[in-house]
Structure formats: structure tokens, C-alpha cells
Image (cartoon, helix red, strand yellow):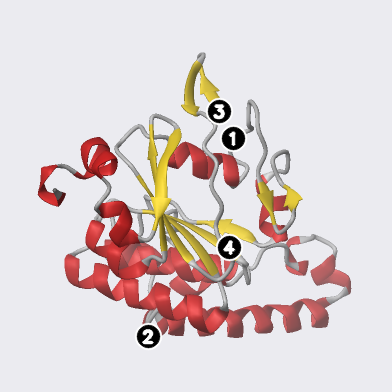
Amino acid sequence: MKRFGGNPAVDGATFAVEEGTITALIGPNGAGKTTCFHCISGFLRLDGGTIEFAGASIARLSPPAIVRRGLVRTFQIPQELSSMTVLENCMLGAGAQRGERPWEPLFRAKRVACEERAHEAHAREMLRLVTLDELAHERAGNLSGGQKKLLELARALIARPKLVLLDEPAAGVNPTLALQLVDHIRRLQRELSVTFLIIEHNMEVVTRLTDTVVVMSAGRVLTEGAPSAVMADPAVQDAYLGSQYR
């Protein structure tokens, strides 16, 4: 449960994401999807209810603590540091690093350097998986919108997560790259054993990519199931998809 000024944005929305799957969270604008993501990732505190991840409640944990548990997220608008390189942006996703502590480079310089080389190697591998390895030394601000989405994905994956929340990965991306994103996500899910929960409005992406679709409306779960079954549900057509799916 999450309210803003007494108005419920998420109101008893209950659903589960099965490990090893790709689940889509869809619904009309204002359905509560992004608020749901904010609550799951710790950016907003619940007003009621609970959130369980890997068998434990994470409802009152901070975002960094949730990331340490293995749950990370991306944003609809990429959050790259434009003046840093693609590789440097990706390495930031590795989380707490010895070199961030002021005394470590002074007293444990070799250990800090060793850790940084390991993070760099891992970041390069993640960039290779999303086909950005040739742009590793390009400024992140020079990337196209679609490439920035891929960088967000690589930066999330460097934390070795169990679950990744993707907020509209195909938004603002040309149709060709959107389908490439589908291939990337499906391959990463298979090769890295990562579970994905995705907010997406592109129904072609949803039907091609996901195992399960959860439909939200007015802060509640309207229905859930396989993409084909959800698309054929008259209630979903009326609330969200429109007459073209009748």
C-alpha cells in the first residue's frame, strides 16, 4: 500500500515473480506501476503491506541495502554520468569499493588496484554482453538513447543481481533496437540466471520477451498470466489495450 495525500497509488497490489523468469508489469498511465517499482527498490516507504525477496522482507530496507541483497533497478530515463566514459559508468555499478574509503588507497594500495582491475574486467564483460564493448572509452553523454538503455542494463548487471527491475527498456528506442533489446535481455536471463521484472508499454516487446504478464489498474492487480491469455482478456482490453485487441 502506498498513498499520496490520502490517494492510493498502490492499493493491495499482490503478485509474485517466479525465479528465473521474465515478468512484465503493464497497465495504463497512472496504474501505479512506477510507484510499485519505487516501493520494491526502497525509494519509497510503504504505508502498509510488505515486500518479500528471497524469503525475507525488504519493505523497510534502504536502496543500498536492497542492492546488497541482489535486487537492482534501472530507470525509464537513463541516469548516466555524461562526462565519464562508458566503462567508468559501468564500473560504478559494482557497489562499495575499497578505493572509495579515503584510507584504503594510502595503506592498501595494491589491494585497491587489484580490486579495481577485477571490476574493470567484469565491466568489460558486461559491456560485451550488451554489445557496447567497442564504445568502452566513449563519453557516455555521446551515446544514443538506445545505447544509454544498454549501458543502464550493463551497469545493473555488474552488481551480479538475482532480480533486475527494468523501467520501460524500449521507451524512446527505435523499433529495430527495441527488438535487439529483447534478444539481449532474453540471452542475459538465460546465461546469467537473472530474473527480470519489466515495466513496458510496447506490446510487441511484451509478447516476444515475457513469460508472465501482470496487469495493474488503479493501483490494483487486474489479472496475470501468460501473454496470450492476458491479451485476450476482455477486462484487460477494456482497461488498457483498446479495441485493436478485440
Q: Secondary structure at mark 4?
A: strand
Q: Earlier in the sequence, mark 2 or mark 3?
A: 3
Q: How busy is the neighbourhood of tag 1: few (under 14 within 10 Å), some, or many (20 plus)? A: some
Mark 1 or mark 4: which comes first in sequence?
A: 1
Query: Residue at (39%, 29%) from the top-left corner?
Result: 218
Tell me whether circle 3 and circle 4 mark residues in contact (CB < 8 Å): no
Residue 163's disc number: 4
Viewer-proximal residue among 188 and 55: 55
Image quarter hosting the N terminus: top right
Mark nearest the camera among 1 and 4 is: 4
Q: Amino acid at mark 4?
A: Leu
Compare marks 1 and 2 and give the one earlier in the sequence.
1
SS label for mark 1: loop
C-alpha distance separating marks 2 and 3: 43 Å
Question: Under tag 2, what secondary structure?
Answer: helix
Label whose residue precedes the other's in the sequence (3 or 4)? 3
Q: Residues within 10 Å of mark 2 (few under 14, many from 20)?
A: few
Query: Hey, what amino acid is under mark 3?
Result: Lys
Give the residue pinned by disc 1: 44
Asked if 177 appears above or below 197 in the picture, the reply is below
Q: Secondary structure at mark 3?
A: strand
Residue position marked by numbered label 2 in the rendering: 134
At label 1, which amino acid type do we have? Leu
Alpha-carbon distance for marks 1 and 3? 8 Å
Q: CA distance from mark 1 to mark 4?
A: 18 Å
Marks 1/2: CA distance? 37 Å
Pick the residue in front: 62 or 239. 239
Would you say 53 lies left or right of 211 here?
Answer: right
The numbered dot on residue 31 is: none
Q: Separation of disc 4 and disc 2 at Cα?
A: 27 Å
Q: Give the residue number, with chain letter if any, for mark 3.
A: 2
